[in-house]
Amino acid sequence: MLHIYGSANSRALRVLWMAGELGLPYEHKDWLPRAPETRTPEFLALNPNGRVPVIDDDGFVLSESMAINFYLAKKHGSALYPADSRHEALALQWSLWETDRLDRQIVNYVRHTEALPEAERKPEIAEAAWKEVVPALDVLETALTTSAWLAGPAFSVADLNVASALYRALTLDLGKWPHVQAWLNRCWERPAAKQARAMRER
Ligand SMILES: N[C@@H](CCC(=O)N[C@@H](CS)C(=O)NCC(=O)O)C(=O)O
């Protein structure tokens, strides 16, 4: 049995989206980041970083959302895992790129402009984050100008990983990046994406 640790209100959102795409049954430990359950010796044995998401798949324990999605897509022989080794490498490239260039930056920007209570927002954090988000979105825009998807001819784990990490961008004005906007909409219109989003926004 697959166990998914982590609330949809965390980076576990990506894993819940992937599980939906694959139609996998799973037991969900719906725990928020830093919840007391993630500070127990049992949880720290699964992930010494104390972070979600983590999966336990019949005793195989894995953390890091991007890696989890590669594992699940490959294990279940999904078309979301690119068959061509170049497309597979591109999927890795984009997932690692997102983790480096956008993942924390977009969260910091949105938290410090709209998500946190006003008194806790720090404009300097938002400004520094935006300075990194803009060139990253420019890079994504260029890539999506010549290709509808990030790694090959169809929606794949690459698109899921990057688009799910851009959940926070769904509320931003992306007018300057029309191809990113159209691609993000295509990704988030998928039934499994809508289902994961509903889990987060319920
Ligand atoms: N690179 C990791 C990041 C995991 C991560 O930072 N998780 C956050 C929630 S989105 C967390 O559990 N934070 C708890 C903490 O900082 O102690 C991944 O993609 O899985």
Image (spheres, rainbow, N blue to C red):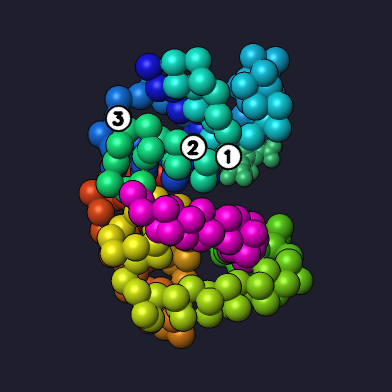
Q: Quadrant of residue 58?
A: top left
The answer as to whether callout 2 falls within 8 Å of ligand 1 is yes
* Residue 160 in view in this figure: no
- Indicate the quadrant containing the N terminus: top left, top right, bottom left or bottom right: top left
Q: Residues within 10 Å of mark 2 (few under 14, many from 20)?
A: many
Q: CA distance from mark 3 to mark 2?
A: 14 Å
Which element carries disc 3, helix, strand or loop?
A: loop
The answer as to whether callout 1 falls within 8 Å of ligand 1 is yes
- On the image, the x and y values in percent for residue 68 come to 49, 37
Q: Residues within 10 Å of mark 3 (few under 14, many from 20)?
A: some
In the image, what residue type sits under mark 2? Ile
Badge 3 is on which residue?
24
Which element carries disc 1, helix, strand or loop?
A: loop
Tell me which residue sits at (36%, 80%) in the image: 146
* Residue 26 in view in this figure: yes
Give the quarter the ligand 1 occupies.
Answer: top right
Tag 2–tag 1 contact (CB < 8 Å):
yes
Q: Residues in magenta?
A: 82-109
Tell me which residue sits at (58%, 55%) in the image: 96
Q: Would you place residue 149 above or below residue 177 in this image?
A: above
Which element carries disc 2, helix, strand or loop?
A: helix
- On the image, the x and y values in percent for residue 114 come to 57, 64
Q: Would you place residue 83 above or below residue 105 in this image?
A: above
In the image, what residue type sits under mark 3? Leu
- On the image, the x and y values in percent for residue 166 come to 48, 60
Determine the residue located farthest toward the front in the rendered image: 85
Q: Is residue 170 left or right of residue 123?
A: left
Q: Which mark is residue 68?
A: 2
Q: CA distance from mark 2 to mark 1?
A: 6 Å
Q: Earlier in the sequence, mark 1 or mark 3?
A: 3
